[in-house]
Amino acid sequence: MRLFLLTICIIIFSSISHAEKYACAYVFNGQAKPLTFERQGQYFVKSNKAMDKITFEDNQSIILQAYYNSNNKPMSFQTLIDKINANFVMVGLKYNGSTSIIQGKCKIY
């Protein structure tokens, strides 16, 4: 029974230690905006509920990508999260309609 409880505790605490959340902020049109990224497996869910796939990760950075196709106009969002300096940069790419580059500082939880 003790071994069973110990195993359960190890599983619970190991899954908690792998939880990862970046609470970020950036300025857009002169206004401060929040943006969070929370890891769920091979994806990060953003505070707007969009899911971005992890396309690269090492001990210094994470690169996220999301693809959308609306009215035959493909668009790709790219995000770079800097784990060391706790910041991010993101842009949406679309022919004749790319977004502004946003960037800001993050707190890591």
Image (cartoon, helix red, strand yellow):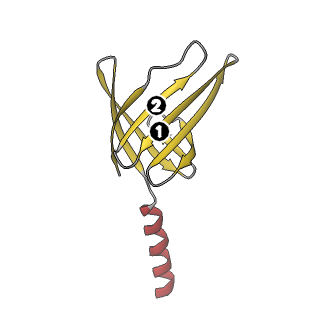
Q: What crowding class fits label 1: few (fewer than 14 Cα within 10 Å), some (14-19), or many (20 or more)?
A: some
Horizontal and vertical percent for residue 53? Answer: 58, 42
User: Which residue sits at x=49%, y=36%?
Assistant: 79
- Please state the horizontal and vertical placement of residue 89, each as a whole percent of the image: 42, 33
Taking the spot 34% from the left edge, 45% from the top edge, the residue there is 85
Residue 35, disc:
none
Residue 57 position in % (x across, y down): 52, 50
Is 31 positioned to the left or the right of 71 in the image?
A: left
User: First in sequence: mark 1 or mark 2?
Assistant: 1
Q: CA distance from mark 1 to mark 2?
A: 6 Å
Residue holding disc 1: 80
SS at mark 1 in the image: strand
Task: Report the front residue among 46 and 57.
Answer: 57
Q: Say if 74 sits above or below 39 in the image.
A: above
Q: Element type at marker 2?
A: strand
Left or right: residue 34 compared with residue 92: left
Cβ–Cβ under 8 Å for marks 1 and 2: yes
Q: Nearer the viewer, residue 70 or 28?
A: 28
Q: What residue type is disc 2 on?
A: Met
Q: Camera-side residue: 36 or 3? A: 36
Residue that protrudes farthest toward the top in the picture: 96
From this view, report whether residue 69 is shown above or below residue 23.
above
Q: Position of residue 108 (x, y in %)?
A: 35, 49
The residue type indicated by label 1 comes to: Leu
> Which residue is more in the foreground, 104 or 15?
104
Residue under pointer 2: 90
Vertical side of 86 occupied by 102: above or below:
above
In the picture, residue 103 is in which quadrant?
top left
Residue occupying the point 36% across, 49% down: 84
